[in-house]
Image: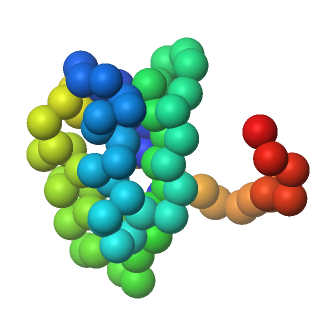
Amino acid sequence: MGLGLRLSADSDTLLPQLRGEKRVEFIVAAVGRYDAVVTIRAANPGELHEQVERIRQIDGIEVAESWAHIRAAKQDYTRRL
């Protein structure tokens, strides 16, 4: 599941807090509609809901919009940004 986050706090301060979340797989600062994009995984919908709610409660996260990844058309992490 993907989350687009809009932040009211500095991303350099806020995003490291997400590293400790066991279901968070991917975290990036972004430019555009969201200040950050996060991918989470879980064994069932209840765990997804629990993780999304925990992230929404973090001070400095104003908006957390979620979506489901249905099928990956391309994933290539061999090239560094």
User: Is 23 situated left or right of 28 in this image?
Assistant: left
Residue 16 lies, in percent from the top left, at 35, 48
Can you say which quadrant of the picture contains the C terminus?
Answer: top right
Q: Colour mode?
A: rainbow
**Which residue is at 37% across, 58% downward?**
19
Q: Residue at x 51, y 33 (%)?
A: 29
64 to 21, vertically: above or below: above
Q: Give left or right: position of 18 versus 81.
A: left
Q: Residue furthest bottom?
A: 43
Q: Nearer the viewer, residue 17 or 53?
A: 17
Name the residue: 55% across, 27% down: 30
Q: Position of residue 73 (x, y in %)?
A: 83, 55
Residue 52 place in picture, x, y as percent:
27, 55
Up-down: is 19 above or below 29?
below
Q: Is residue 10 above or below residue 2?
A: above
**Rendered residue at 53%/56% (across/down):** 26
Q: How many marks?
A: 0
Looking at the picture, how far across and down is residue 13, in whole percent?
29, 34
Task: Confirm whether residue 67 shows in the render.
Answer: no
Q: Is residue 17 above or below residue 15?
A: below
- The answer to whether residue 14 shows anywhere in this view is yes
Determine the image quadrant of residue 57. Answer: top left
Instruction: Give the farthest residue toward the top.
Output: 32
